[in-house]
């Protein structure tokens, strides 16, 4: 599969390196697009076609698939152009700035075998893969409660000062929910499904000089009566990563480094109705899963993408699933704006209209000319 990459920022270059290092079987990097054109001299020297404009790369006909690694507000126009040209598409997270925009991207597919995937790389995280296996095997029984405190996404002010589009309504459509937490929101709904309603409180620019949310506390309700809590922040240090999933037959706990499954000897509901022990509880056993070697999650998603195109696998992260994370993020922001509970599915048109009002007042950030030190390995959680 001949790949083109549009956008050679930090993450775009990681995708390029993974392909060029041979980590994706059956993949070749044949084209890149970026501005300024001088930023691609190293690729040009390797015989890779270089374009200063995304449209030129798409229209060149060189690529079977395009990876879009640009600021979020450019995802829709460029993703739609790539799909209308007939190429396969991998979009960096999030799929778009909001649900309605994501729907327009997916509607641009030209044929059934045209793949559209999303770089939701944490679906390849060994801990979350293990949790998914346990849940699908029925280890927890019916969901009772889920809670994720994800506050170790700390970002200093220089992070926001490095790009004019970052942490603006126009550039990203949000803050911590749209930039850092799409992975967590995606994994959450991947594991336990979508809630039926959300009540949230987002703080906008609480810890940083930004116009979007940098702290979120949300309460979920599910159709079966289960409840949920989601807390996120880019203003806490050292922060916490703790996911709890509680079911009638067990509990799963993880900090992202290892996972513990606590199995109940019997259903909690059944025990509660049958026992004569006033302070009794079901007996429990524990199983701990510790991942072995680290997994290159970005390479795993690309490798799966190539295999899916060859009919050898199902997509791990189909872009259609990205609508769910956009819906959850949008519902949390919208709940704050209207100061009320939001029923799901989210009214995509109403949210788009409300977001458009913020975008109309949104201003690009002034880029502070400073030598920011960038170590992308520290950006992953």
Image (cartoon, helix red, strand yellow):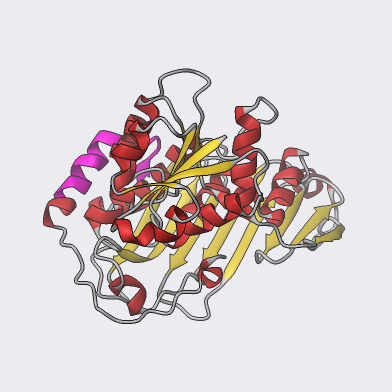
* x 28%, y 45%: residue: 53
Task: Give the left or right position of residue 59, taking residue 309 as reference.
Answer: left
In this rendered view, identify the residue nearer to me: 252 or 119.
119
Q: Is residue 191 visible?
A: no
x then y, percent, for residue 188 = 56, 49
Count how many numbered circles sit on residues in the image. 0
Report the side of 317 relative to 72 (left or right): right
Q: Is residue 353 magenta?
A: yes
34 and 295: which is toward the camera: 34
Q: Is residue 288 magenta?
A: no
Spot the residue most to the left.
Answer: 361
Where 377 sits versus 249, above or below? below
Q: Quadrant of residue 309?
A: top right
Q: Residue, x 54% and y 50% (percent of image)?
A: 227
Front residue of this view, candidates 342 and 372:
372
Q: Is residue 344 above or below residue 130?
A: above
Which residue is at 30% across, 81% downward? 370
Which sits in the foreground, 343 or 70?
70
Q: What percent of the width, then of the height, locates residue 54?
A: 32, 42
Q: Quadrant of residue 304?
A: top right
| Residue for point 47% across, 63% down | 231
Q: Which contiguous range is marked in magenta?
A: 341-357
In percent of width and height, residue 194 lies at 51, 40
Q: Is residue 45 visible?
A: yes
Q: Where the N terminus falls, by quadrant?
A: top right
> How far across and down, in percent of the image, does residue 316 sit?
62, 39
């Amino acid at each position: 599969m001949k790949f083109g990459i549009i956008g050679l920022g930090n993450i775009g270059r990681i995708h390029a390196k993974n392909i060029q290092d041979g980590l994706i079987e059956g993949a070749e990097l044949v084209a890149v697009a970026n501005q300024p054109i001088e930023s691609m001299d190293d690729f040009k020297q390797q015989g890779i076609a270089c374009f200063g404009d995304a449209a030129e790369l798409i229209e060149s006909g060189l690529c079977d698939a395009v990876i879009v690694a640009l600021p979020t507000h450019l995802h829709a126009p460029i993703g739609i152009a790539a799909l209308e040209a007939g190429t396969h598409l991998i979009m960096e997270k999030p799929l778009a700035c909001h649900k309605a925009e994501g729907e327009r991207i997916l509607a641009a597919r030209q044929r059934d075998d045209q793949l559209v995937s999303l770089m939701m790389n944490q679906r390849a995280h060994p801990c979350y893969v293990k949790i998914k296996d346990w849940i699908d095997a029925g280890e927890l029984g019916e969901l009772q409660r889920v809670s994720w405190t994800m506050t170790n996404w700390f970002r200093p002010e220089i992070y926001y000062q490095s790009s004019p589009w970052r942490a603006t309504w126009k550039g990203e459509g949000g803050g911590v929910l749209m930039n850092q937490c799409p992975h967590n929101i995606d994994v959450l709904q991947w594991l336990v499904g979508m809630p039926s309603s959300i009540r949230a409180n987002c703080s906008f620019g609480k810890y940083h000089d930004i116009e979007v949310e940098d702290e979120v506390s949300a309460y979920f309700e599910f159709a079966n009566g289960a409840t949920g809590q989601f807390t996120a922040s880019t203003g806490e240090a050292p922060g916490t990563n703790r996911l709890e999933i509680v079911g009638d037959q067990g509990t799963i706990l993880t900090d992202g480094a290892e996972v513990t499954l606590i199995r109940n000897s019997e259903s909690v509901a059944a025990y509660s109705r049958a026992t004569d022990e006033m302070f009794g509880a079901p007996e429990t056993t524990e199983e701990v899963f510790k991942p072995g070697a680290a997994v290159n999650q970005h390479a795993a998603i690309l490798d799966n993408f190539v295999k899916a195109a060859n009919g050898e696998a199902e997509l791990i992260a189909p872009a259609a699933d990205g609508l769910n994370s956009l819906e959850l993020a949008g519902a949390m922001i919208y709940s704050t704006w209207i100061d009320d509970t939001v029923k799901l599915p989210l009214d995509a048109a109403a949210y788009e209209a409300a977001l458009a009002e913020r975008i109309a007042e949104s201003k690009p950030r002034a880029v502070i000319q400073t030598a920011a030190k960038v170590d992308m390995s520290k950006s992953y959680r």
